[in-house]
Amino acid sequence: MQENEKDIQKLNNRFRELAEKSFQQNLFTFTGFLGLSEQDAFFRLERELSYAGCTLFGGRENAERRMLRFGSPQEFGYDVPFPIVCIHIRPVAAKFADSLSHRDFLGALMNLGIERSTLGDIMVGDKEAYLFCADSMGDYICEQLTQVRHTSVTCAITENFEEIPMEEPVRQRIQVSSPRVDALLAKVYNKSRSDCLELFRAGRVFVDGRLCESNSRLLKGGETVNARGFGKFVYTGQAGETRKGKLNVEVAVFR
């Protein structure tokens, strides 16, 4: 058995363990933050685990990295929020701060010896960032994260989500012969069909959080395509045909 298969099997066993514990003890149980591949592993077990009540949430709407909660407020008669906090990371002196990327912030956090599963999405703004993380790590990060690259930073837990920078997608209209996922990938990222096929073979294409194994899959309006290493886009839908029978389709591309 390959190492990756062992990891997936271990993760599946963890899902089953948490679901059973929640069901038997009438309490909410949580995973850490799950990446796209880990969420896909859950989706493959979703029907089996549905008896325990399953909810995914990452601290904000449309979060990419999300925690999985087992337990039903309707069944239990009470509710428990996801153990997630948001940390505002900003330079001590903005005037002298570097222009910092998602990779810069993530690298600084990982250098603290933090497990990736305790970290959710990082929303990067102008020389600052908002980090969603497990509440158990909030105080530690606020105390220990003092520098990102060459920039001194300060951190504070915040509940003012209105300040969090929202990704504004670039809306595009493109022409394709059909709304196949590989056709849209090729157009959006200016890749050949053969290049796109390699993304599918490498397991790097996800549709609405689920691994997409068929490059000929037809997309439906509102579905989100994530190509790891390139970005994501939302397929908005068709907007008519050309005289030559091509489809005009609309997408919202996140860079």
Image (cartoon, helix red, strand yellow):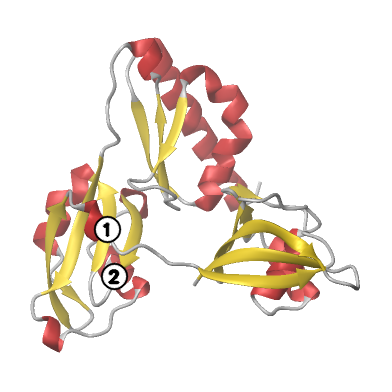
Is any part of residue 240 visible from this angle? Answer: yes
Circle 1/circle 2 CB separation < 8 Å: yes
| Kind of residue sitting beneath label 1 | Leu
208 vs 90, left or right, is right
Q: Image point 16% across, 74% down: which residue?
A: 147
1 vs 158, left or right, is right
- Name the residue tied to disc 2: 105
> Is residue 248 positioned above or below 33 on the image?
below
Q: Can you give x and y, in whole percent of width and height, for residue 156 in the image?
A: 11, 58
Q: Image point 39% across, 21% down: which residue?
A: 71
Q: Secondary structure at mark 1?
A: strand
Q: Can you give x and y, in whole percent of width and height, for residue 25 in the image?
A: 34, 12
| Kind of residue sitting beneath label 2 | Phe
Q: Image point 21% across, 43% down: which residue?
A: 135
Between circles 1 and 2, the one closer to the viewer is: 1
- Name the residue tied to disc 1: 131
